[in-house]
Structures are given as structure tokens and as C-alpha cells.
Amino acid sequence: MSRTGIIIACILMAAVPYFFASGYQLFQLTLVVTYAVAILGLNLVTGYNGQVSLGHGAFYAVGAYTTAILMDKFDVPYWATLPISAAVCAGFGFLIGLPALRLGGLYLALTTFALAVAVPQLLKYRLFEDYTGGVQGIVILKPDPPFGLPMTGDQWVFLFTLLVGIVCFVLSANLVKGRIGRAMMAIRDQPLAAEAMGIDIAMLKTRTFAVSALMTGIAGSLGAIAVQFVAPDAFGVPLSLTFFVGFVVGGGASIVGPIFGAIFVEFIPNIADEISKAAPGAVYGVLLIALMFLAPGGCASLVRKAAPYMPWNRKTG
Amino acid sequence: MDGVLHQVFSGIASGGIYASIALALVMIFTATHHVNFAQGEMAMFSTYIALTLIEAGVPYWGAFAITIVFAMVVGTIVQKILMEPLMNAPVLASVGVFIGLLFIFNSVAGWIFTYTLKPFPTPFGEGGPLLGGFFSRHELGSTAITVVVLFSVWAFFRFTSLGLAMRAAAFNPVSSRLVGVPVATMLALGWGLASGIGAIAGMMVAPIVFLDPNMMGGVLLYAFAGALLGGITNPLGAVLGGFLVGIIENLGGAYIVGTELKLSLALIIIVAVLTLKPAGLFGKVLASRV
Amino acid sequence: MQPETKLLEVKGLRAGYGETWAVHGIDFEVMAGRVTALLGANGAGKTTTLRAISGMVKTAGTVDFNGKSLVGMKTEAIAAAGIAHVPDGRGTFMELSVEENMKLGAYTRKGDQTAEFDRMFAYFPKLKERFRQQAGLLSGGEQQMLAIARALLLKPKLLLLDEPSFGLAPLIVREIFDIMRQIKDREGVGILVVEQNASLALDISENAYLLETGRIVMSGASSEIAKDEGLRRSYLGY
């Protein structure tokens, strides 16, 4: 898609809160953007760099709690929590990335899965209760639109989330298109050759982990602001699994993939619930499997196949 | 001291269940390089079938046998219908299918059998503890069953020509076809066998934790950890790893952090061990010449 | 055993991978009890041709084995019908023992294989010494011997050998080809051998076909081809 096309799409999306969605729908769209950023983070490390993470919910949780604690205990304005949250999550991701250097493949999957299990338990742990609020979690206030802009708080939260989301996507797209992105994929596909070409595998892997955790952490912050509430049980294994499903559905090593993945994980459960109140999980599972059969490479692979037939790419004559 | 021993024996009993599921995971992993995330849910579903049969008046061991056959048939069918067509698809597609299966089994079980905890009978009687009070009757019985199962599986792979063909199909599918081994059938049988082993583990763990659709979540994670701890390419290592995880979990939960953090603690210990010894405790680096 | 019966008859065979063909319509035949050689440079389509016979790649055309068509049959069924294939790279089951490799060779045969195993040990005494060892630890030459033994244990009517000399020291190659000559005389199987080492292959075979980029450019009696100096220089490079 052309650059103008992308800009027009962004403006259209920004206009959504005024004309179409309201209330719950707007909230859902805010979450789609949030999840898309979280899945984008997962895609950087798993899709582009080949390091499987089953525990990105943990980074999301750390981002969300950083924002919530800063707002609740230290009265930091919501927008100012984002850079701090990004820094905290990047540092956390870097630390997790260190053992990951020794643990390839499934071992890394287990390590990150352990993280997904441990983080909610630690958030509940009584020693940290003064900060984390224990099982109860933390309630935070909805931000008001700045400069007296004529819109509701919900509309502003959507716009703010969208803005941050677009920045994350543009930065990631530039990252993977460039030299570093090629090196990331070289490590994934041909580690020996990559090392022979002079790529510092250890450094790049840990840094990728840090960047990935940063993205997902920012998503956590955005999510906390949108939901106005954080609690340990919202950030358990199911959340990590949700991100992973979104990643698989969107397709690996793709920048647009996470958007499709986020739409899937946000809306398909509701659709499944409407189809069968009795066993929505079964409908969700069937839809997921069906999608894997239709598009084994995820939605991104379908987009790639369809692209030559799209009007803006069709050659005349 | 008695308390420690008691925890160790409890650990061996639950470790046996992890060991069974770990073995099931390793079997499928060796053949396909996939970790079947739905292994635990399939076992849980089979356990419900056993309960239904028992409640309908089938004697325990009859229900036990029927359930194993049922689980093997389901495992084989799942492989044939869902996994075989994706054999040449990207790995992530298979992972997506595993997660989808997990949702389906969990949800269908909740729908048919409800989400309430149900007691599951033990065939070993309710009487007092045995062996100096360290083992409950069920712990002793289920450990014995587990050991028998693990030994039979080992003997099957080691001494029968079908077992040999299944191993060959897992290691080298191309050469296996060239000597006449129907590889697709072997993979399906492997899934069936893994599913049957899982069903036994489910029926052994259900009397301890009670039966509900989420029963196997933690068990699968411990089993996965056990498989990796022992070495995922080494079935015997995976089994030992499963037992070890059971002991670590029980001791850690009782003496270090309490039950609320025991899962985290167990996993952190395992990750620490793996960081020091990435191939697992018993994983062998396969020797080969080119 | 009538030496002049056609064991394998291939007509208009095309074979390839995915969207492309690597073999573009070739005809050849293999006689029972004879050795036929497929010669050609790297990438000429020799290996693909063998894989087509075993049903391992996309195949079109006629492949008749004892008058029965093989096209569309599964690889394992083709093996069970009596075609043993030693693939490129020898196809050793590295993780398994020598014994288990040999048992797998006899997978399609029922009953006690002790006598058959002893027959193989007569050809390849090294395999008896190494019977209990992990096959991945054998030397390249030993693995090639194991591969041939594994193939013969199927009791095949047709034996397909893909580059038996590949990666082996000349002395070992000579040893293996000597044994192959014995096998040819005693077992009465038809052998289709693919080789880059043309002089060896012409020496052991009765008939030869020369492949170039997926087409047959020359065929005839091996002794005739070996005599034709011009042909040797331009195609076979020795």
C-alpha cells in the first residue's frame, strides 16, 4: 500500500470516534489498537527474530502496573507514565533476554511461559501489596481531553491510544526494513551464517527482546489507561495465550499481521459467544483451526497473496 | 524428617503423573517437533468419559480400559484429520491448531459436564496410609500404575517391530518410507498412544485434584517442564524429569514459599537449571558422523 | 530367472518439485538380473528420476514395474512391491543401532530374519562387528554397506542405488563395487545405479543412459560407451 494510502487510513480511523462508534464499541476499538501494539511487540521477537515467547502477557502486566502505580501513588500524569513504562519494560525484557541467549526454542518458550505464570502470582504477593494493591488491584482515573478539546474522555483515550499505536507501528516498520531488521531475520534463519557475517548474535537477541518488551509494555500502559483498572488475574496465562493466538492468526514476520491478530482476539470471542452461549470456547477453537487451514501462514500471508490484485497495485494494460 | 519424607513421597506420586504426560509430549515431539499443547485437555476429556462410564455402572477397571481405547481412537483421529494435512505448513499453523484444540476440548467438557469440581473414584480404596504412613493408598497405587505404564511403553518401543517402526518414522521419515514403513499411519498411532498415556494420567490425578475442565492446566505445565528438565529428546530423561519436578514442587511448596507461589518457584528452579545445562539433565548430544 | 525380461519400463517420464520439472520426458528400461547405469553431471536429473520411481516426487508419464504401473502409488507401497531404494546420503537411521537398521530393512518381510542377516554378514563382515553400535557412529563406507544390506533385506526385485561412491575414499569405493558385483551375480536382482563416477558405473553395468538437464542424450551398451573416446571426453569427462 502506498504511503498516502496509509495516511488516509490513519485519518479515517481517527475520525471513527466522531461518526461511528460510541461507548462500548469505541472501548473495543481502543483495545484492538492496544492489543495490536502488544502483538507487534511479540512479533518482533518471535516472528522476526525467531525467539518463541509464550509469556508476553508478563511484559504487558509490567507496563500496565507501572502506569497504574505511577498514576495512583505518585500522581504522575498518564502521558508521562509511557516513557517510564517503556524504560522499565525494556530493562525487564533485557534481563529476561539474558538467559534466553542460552535457551533456544522450546526452552525459551518454557522460560517465558514460567514468566507468564509467575508475574500475576508476584503481583498478588503480600509483600508488594502496598504498591500493587494485592488481589484488589488499582483503580485509576480516566484522563480528560487536553486543551479543552470538544470530545468525551472515551473519545480522547481512543485518539491517544491510536496516536501512540501509529508511532509504535511506524518505528517498528522502519526497524525491520533496515539493517537491524535484516540482521534479526538472518539470526532466525541462518544463525551460523549470521555469525560468520559479523553479527553480534548475543547482543542483537537481547536487544530485540528489550525492544519487544518495550512495545508490549507500552501496550500494557495504554490498556491500563483504557480500562482504568489493573488487577493480577487479568494478566495471567490466558492473556499471554491471547497474544500468541493473535500473533499466529496475524502471521509471523509481518507489520500488518498484528492488526488482524488484534481484531481476531478482540472480536471473535464475542462472535463465538453469540453463536453458542453454551460452548463459546469450542466455537472460538473451531474458528481458529479453520483459519489455520485457510491461511497456514496467517492473515498476513493472505494479504501478501492478494496484494498484486489490489487496485492500487494493478498495472494498467 | 518424617515431614520431608512425606513430601518427597507425595512428590513421587504426583511426579509419576507429570512423567506420564511428559512422555506423551516427548513422543509427539520426537516424531513431529511439535509440543502438543492440547495433550492435557485431551486427557481431561478422557477422564470425564471414564467418570460417565463409572456413574453408568461400569466397573472401575472396565471403564479404565474403555477410556484408554477411546482416548487412543480420538488421538489417532485428531492426528489424521487435523495434523496430517498441515504436515508441510508452517510450524505456527500447527501451534494454532493445538491452541484451538485446547479451547475446544476445554469448552466442550465444560458444556457437557459443567465446570463444577467433581470427585473421581480411586480403585485403590480409601483406607489408611501405607508404607509407614508415607504413601496414601491412592498415591501408592497410582505410582505403581504409572511405573507399569512407563515400563510397558519402553518395552513396546524397544522390543516390538511396530515400536521400532514408530521410532524409525519419527527419526527419519524418508528412509522409513523407502523400507516400506507407512509413516503417516505410524504418526497417527503415536498420537493415539500418547493420548492413551495421557488418559491414564488423567484418571490417576483426578482423585487427588478433583475433576474439572481446567484440571490439567498445571499438570501440563509441570510435565512440559519435566520433559525439558530431563531432555526433550530423551524419553527416559523426560520421565525422570517428571518425577523430579513433582518432588521439587512438593518440597518447595511445603518448606520455602507456601502453596501460593509454588508453581512460580518450581518453574524458576527449572529455568535456572536449564540455563546452566541447556540440553536438560539427561539430554544427550546425539553423536553423528557426516 | 530369464535375464531378458523387462523389470522396469519407463516411458515419457516427467518428474519435478513444486511448480517445476527437473526431468522432461525420458524413456529407459531395466532388465531383470542386469545392472543399468544412469550417468550425468550434477543436476542432470538422475536423483530425481530415482525418486520418481519410488513415488517421492511429482511424477507424470509411465513407470511400469513387472507390467504394473507405479505412478500414483505411495512410497511405502512401492517398497513393499519389491523396489529397494538406497537414497542419496545413504538414508541411515543414525539414532538407531546397526541391528535395528537391518530389522527395518526387513520390515516388509515376516518371520525370522537370522538367516538373512547371516547372508548380509557374509557380504559385509564389518556389520557383524558393529551389530550393536549406534549406526550414526559408523564410517561413511560402513554406512554405505549398511544401506545396501538394509536394501537387500527387503528381498527386492529391483535395487535403486543413488551415488554409492559419494564421499567415499577410492579404496572403499572399490571394495563396495566389488561386493556389488557379487550381489549382482548371486541375488539376481535388477539394479539401477546412478553415478557421477562414470568409469566405475560403466565398468559394473551392462547398459547405460546419459542424462543431461533432464533429457536422455545417449544410451547403449556400457562396453560400447566406454570404448567411444569422443563420447567419453565430451560427456563423461575422463
Image: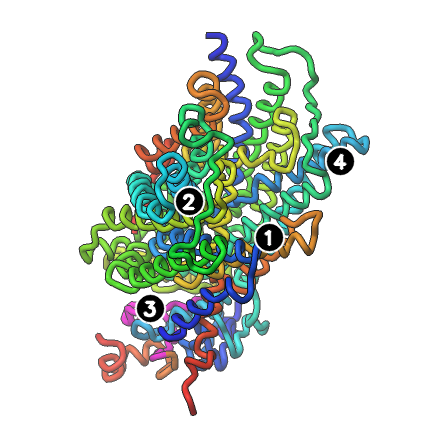
Dot 4 lies on which element? helix
What segment is highlighted magenta in the picture? C191-213
Residue to which mark 3 is pinned: C195
Residue type at mark 3 is Glu
Residue to which mark 2 is pinned: A60
Residue to which mark 1 is pinned: A269
Chain for numbered disc 2: A
Residue C200 among magenta residues:
yes
Q: Nearer the viewer, residue B19 or A147?
A: A147
Residue B133 among magenta residues:
no
Chain for numbered disc 3: C
Residue type at mark 1 is Pro
Query: What is the quadrant of the N terminus of chain A in the image?
Result: bottom left
In this rendering, would A37 be left or right of B160?
left
Dot 3 lies on which element? strand
Can residue C173 be seen here? The reply is no
What residue do we see at 31% from left, 58% from top?
Answer: A185
On whether disc 3 and disc 2 are found on a single subunit, the reply is no
Dot 1 lies on which element? helix
Residue reaching furthest to the front: A148
On whether disc 1 and disc 4 are found on a single subunit, the reply is no
Chain for numbered disc 1: A
Residue to which mark 4 is pinned: B52
Categorize mark 3 by other alpha carbons within 10 Å: few (<14), some (14-19), many (20+).
many
Disc sitting over residue C54 in the figure: none
